[in-house]
Image: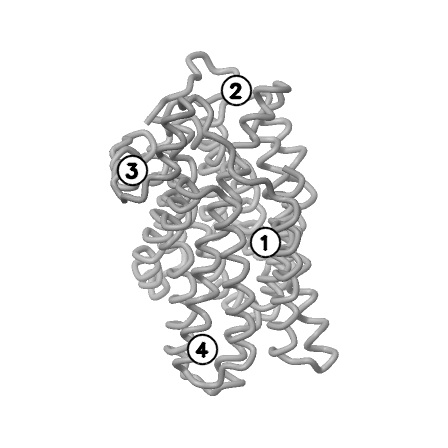
């Protein structure tokens, strides 16, 4: 688990040393039109989130180690390619490679983290959400430090190419660490050894189709995906509606960096104590519902909060409440997945959770983007309804392990 947590930290340092500066590089550095910059960024997101289910399925089939190693190798190649890409075609190819690399290693690491959190819970009685919160906090710490590394390289005159190469070097270190330290796949618990060996060596694709049917026919898991999608559509407003609000309030987007830093610092400082409190007192389902409700309150607060210092108080209130809701619901949602699917399907289910949510974000972005033309109170009220709908869906889920609600139990898909 320490290796997985350190991996998440390093992943985000390498990734966020590059991502915040990509749009400026494409527009100012390469002279791309605004619509083309948006297309490239959208392709990166879709090639990552939309293909998570592929990485999850491969993890279940071959184990996390080879999938993580392959993902790291592709990310190194992608960053190296992007550093020297000068045409639209080569930039798009490099960005797609970078996104697909994450679609491989992220589901592998996240599903293995969920599996280890369950093992730790069974061995010690410590709620799995606390372990997963540490995993999330490490990722946010990396997301905070990564842009600082990129900014430092830019200030030193290295430019975007230096940031890409620095990101590639981070993934070289991760690749070397995993090649040396990550164990090979263990036999799936609860499966007879002969059956496990057969599943691991049979070359046909039938087991994969069977697993897909089992996961996507699981009503409780699909409801979790829909509820989680409500959160991700809401979270995407950090990049869509928040800049519009900051521009309206201050006349520029200069304060956005400080608001993003505020969000990351909140997670680093508050995630562990908040999850320690919630994991021992409330069930995962309750934490998920409460988190979605807090996110909805963040949207509702924007038109109701009086403009404070330099007009940023409504935007800061939104960021704080969105981040608090995220800290409650993300470990709870990830902790529910092992209760809803069989252990052998955990990688596929972890990937599917992100893929379904990514498709929802892709579809919801156009709809929420259209709201930018309506009045602010109407826009924020409609946006608040998205996580509220997710909270209503979450009421139908089993309570999950780790809480004090009666009836918490494991549910097989």
Which label number is shown at residue 316? 1
| Sequence-first tag of 2 and 4 | 4
Which quadrant of the structure image shows residue 259?
Answer: bottom right
Which label number is shown at residue 84? none
Which label number is shown at residue 91? 4
Q: Which residue is mark 2?
A: 403
Q: On the picture, is 298 further left or further right than 121? A: left
- Contact (Cβ within 8 Å) of mark 3 with mark 2: no
Q: Which quadrant does the N terminus fall into? A: top right
Q: Nearer the viewer, mark 1 or mark 4?
A: 4
Q: Which residue is mark 3?
A: 207
Q: Nearer the viewer, mark 3 or mark 4?
A: 3
- In this rendering, is residue 65 above or below 406? below
Q: Secondary structure at mark 1?
A: helix
- Contact (Cβ within 8 Å) of mark 3 with mark 4: no
The alpha-carbon separation of the residues under discs 2 and 4 comes to 47 Å
Where is residue 211 drawn, in percent x and y? Answer: 30, 36
């Amino acid at each position: 688990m320490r290796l997985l947590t350190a991996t998440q930290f390093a992943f985000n340092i390498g990734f966020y040393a590059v991502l915040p500066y990509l749009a400026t590089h494409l527009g100012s550095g390469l002279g791309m039109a605004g619509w083309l910059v948006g297309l490239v960024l959208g392709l990166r997101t879709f090639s990552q989130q939309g293909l998570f289910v592929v990485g999850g399925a491969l993890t279940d089939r071959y184990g996390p180690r080879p999938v993580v190693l392959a993902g790291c190798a592709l990310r190194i190649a992608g960053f190296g390619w992007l550093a020297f890409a000068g045409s639209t075609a080569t930039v798009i190819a490099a960005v797609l490679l970078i996104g697909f690399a994450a679609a491989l290693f992220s589901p592998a690491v996240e599903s293995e983290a969920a599996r280890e959190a369950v093992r730790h819970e069974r061995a010690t009685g410590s709620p799995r959400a606390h372990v997963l919160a540490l995993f999330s906090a490490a990722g946010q710490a990396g997301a905070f430090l990564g842009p600082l590394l990129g900014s430092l390289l830019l200030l030193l005159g290295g430019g975007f190419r230096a940031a890409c190469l620095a990101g590639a070097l981070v993934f070289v270190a991760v690749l070397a660490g995993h090649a040396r330290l990550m164990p090979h796949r263990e036999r799936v618990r609860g499966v007879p050894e002969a059956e496990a060996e057969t599943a691991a060596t049979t070359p046909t694709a039938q087991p994969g189709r069977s697993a897909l049917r089992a996961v996507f026919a699981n009503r409780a898991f699909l409801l979790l995906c829909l509820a989680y999608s409500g959160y991700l559509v809401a979270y995407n407003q950090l990049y869509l509606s928040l800049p519009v609000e900051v521009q309206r309030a201050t006349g520029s987007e200069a304060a956005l960096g400080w608001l993003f830093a505020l969000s990351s610092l909140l997670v680093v400082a508050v995630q562990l104590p908040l999850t320690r409190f919630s994991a021992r007192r409330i069930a995962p389902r309750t934490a998920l519902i409460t988190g979605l409700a807090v996110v909805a309150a963040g949207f509702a607060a924007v038109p109701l909060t009086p403009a404070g210092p330099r007009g940023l108080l409504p935007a800061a209130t939104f960021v704080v409440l969105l981040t608090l809701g995220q800290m409650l619901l993300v470990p709870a949602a990830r902790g529910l997945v092992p209760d809803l699917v069989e252990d052998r399907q955990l990688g596929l289910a972890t990937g599917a959770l992100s893929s379904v949510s990514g498709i929802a974000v892709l579809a919801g972005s156009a709809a929420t983007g259209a709201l930018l033309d309506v009045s602010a109170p109407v826009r924020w009220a409609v946006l608040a309804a998205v996580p509220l709908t997710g909270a209503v869906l979450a009421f139908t889920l089993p309570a999950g392990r780790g809480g004090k609600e009666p009836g918490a139990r494991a549910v097989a898909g």
